[in-house]
Image: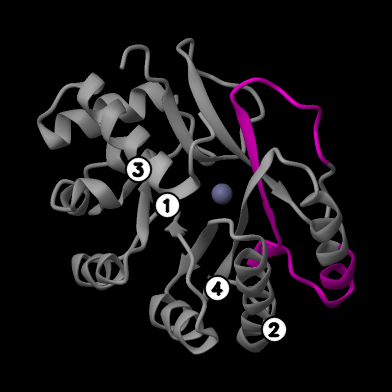
């Protein structure tokens, strides 16, 4: 196959910073954002981010999410998850996250997870709910042991700007992971998706075209044939 695009699995940039063809999954915050007009190669995820959960916003956010899910451009639930670095009480975060998992199960779509220092909790909730979902941990910042355990569950790990930073251990972990479990993202990074692919390919000691094939294959496995 020729002309395989870059795939940016999680971004907050509404415009493609890269000059090259790119399929993007742009994040929408359920508590604030409305569905943008349809654009070529542009998909969306929507969810309540643990940073923005407040009692008044949960209800309106979930209502907006349910309403927006009718739009076929939303291909994933999220980002949603658990974050031990914010003030929102963990029990509230867990309740909201459970709701997202059940919605994702209901509509049979993948879920994009934001997780900070709460990996065991995320896995426990997932198991307790007995859901069966394609789950993508975006901006993976855990250690190798955590990565191994998430991969054993069949989850995907996505990496972005941290691959460029020698002090972060993302690069060291990334190159040891099975190719079938990875995605790449720009998130809020200043790097373009092309730059992130370039760095990731260097770390894997393959060329960018091979990496494009790997990520494209993973996208099809996770999302079905959307592109
Ligand atoms: Zn994000």
How far across and how far down the image is residue 192, in percent? 44, 24
How far across and how far down the image is residue 104, in percent? 62, 64
First in residue order: circle 4 vs circle 2: 4
Q: Quadrant of residue 191?
A: top left
Query: Are discs 2 and 3 less than 8 Å apart at CB?
Result: no
Q: In the shown orientation, is residue 47 left or right of residue 173?
A: right
Residue topped by disc 4:
82
Residue 105, above or below 2: below
First in residue order: circle 4 vs circle 3: 4
First in residue order: circle 2 vs circle 1: 2
Residue topped by disc 3:
218
CA distance for labels 2 and 1: 22 Å
Query: Are discs 4 and 1 less than 8 Å apart at CB?
Result: no
Residue topped by disc 2:
92
Instruction: Name the one closer to the observer, 215 or 1.
Output: 1
For image coordinates 48% across by 43% down, the residue present is: 224
Residue topped by disc 1:
139
């Amino acid at each position: 196959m020729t002309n395989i695009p870059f795939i940016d699995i999680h971004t907050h940039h509404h415009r493609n910073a890269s000059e090259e063809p790119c399929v993007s999954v742009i994040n929408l915050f359920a508590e604030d954002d409305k569905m943008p007009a349809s654009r070529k190669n542009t998909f969306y995820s929507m969810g309540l981010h643990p940073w923005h959960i407040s009692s008044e916003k949960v209800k309106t956010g979930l209502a907006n999410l349910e309403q927006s899910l009718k739009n076929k451009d939303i291909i994933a639930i999220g980002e949603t998850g658990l974050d031990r670095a914010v003030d929102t009480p963990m029990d509230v975060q867990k309740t909201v996250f459970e709701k997202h998992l059940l919605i994702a199960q209901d509509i049979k779509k993948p879920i994009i997870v934001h997780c900070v220092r709460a990996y065991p909790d995320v896995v426990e909730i997932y198991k307790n709910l007995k859901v069966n979902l394609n789950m993508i941990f975006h901006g993976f910042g855990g250690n190798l042991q955590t990565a191994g355990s998430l991969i054993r569950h069949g989850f995907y790990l996505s990496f972005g700007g941290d691959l460029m930073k020698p002090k972060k251990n993302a690069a060291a972990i990334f190159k040891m992971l099975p190719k079938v479990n990875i995605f790449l993202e720009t998130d809020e990074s200043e790097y373009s998706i092309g730059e992130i692919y370039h760095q990731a390919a260097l770390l894997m000691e393959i060329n960018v075209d091979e990496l494009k094939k790997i990520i494209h294959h993973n996208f099809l496995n996770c999302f079905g044939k959307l592109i």
